[in-house]
Image (cartoon, rainbow, N blue to C red):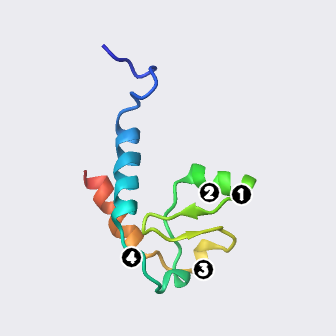
Amino acid sequence: MATMDEPGTAGGVDVMDRELEKLLNEEQLEDGDHERFSHYVPKDKILESALTGKPVRALCGKKWTPGRDPEKFPVCPTCKAVYEKMRDA
């Protein structure tokens, strides 16, 4: 029997990460109004980006290096929809 301490058995978080990766890979990315919104990104990825300078990928698929105050922009409707879909799953 697997325990929560064993690698690969983290449960819900691992499943959500795999589902998010699948959604992002299937998503057709288009140019659009991404720059007008603040986007949802896992907190650990924001911290990693701040430390390494590596770009992050938002739930909507936008990839960029964060550097502006997200409080100044409305939330991306696509990110919000993906987040709500993940919460309901």
Badge 1 amino acid: Ala
Residue 33 versus residue 69: which sits nearer the camera? 33
Q: Residue at x 52, y 54 (%)?
A: 42
Q: Which residue is mark 4?
A: 77
Of all residues, the one furthest to the top in this rendering is: 1
Determine which residue is flagged by label 3: 72
Marks 1 and 3: which is nearer the front?
1
Residue visible at 25% across and 54% down in the picture: 88
Mark 1, residue position: 50
Q: Secondary structure at mark 2?
A: helix
Q: Is residue 39 above or below residue 16?
A: below
Disc 2 marks which residue? 46
Compare marks 3 and 2 and give the one earlier in the sequence.
2
The one nearer the camera, 33 or 31, is 31
Give, as a three-letter code, the residue at label 3.
Lys
Q: Earlier in the sequence, mark 3 or mark 4?
A: 3
Do tag 2 and tag 1 residues touch (Cβ < 8 Å)? yes
The answer to whether marks 1 and 3 mark residues whose Cβ atoms lie closer than 8 Å is no
Residue at horizontal 53 percent and vertical 84 percent from the top? 36
Depicted 67 relative to depicted 7: above or below: below
**Circles 3 and 4: CB distance less than 8 Å?**
no
In terms of secondary structure, where does tag 1 sit? helix
Q: Quadrant of residue 66?
A: bottom right
On the image, the x and y values in percent for residue 60 come to: 42, 69
Left or right: residue 73 versus residue 76 is right
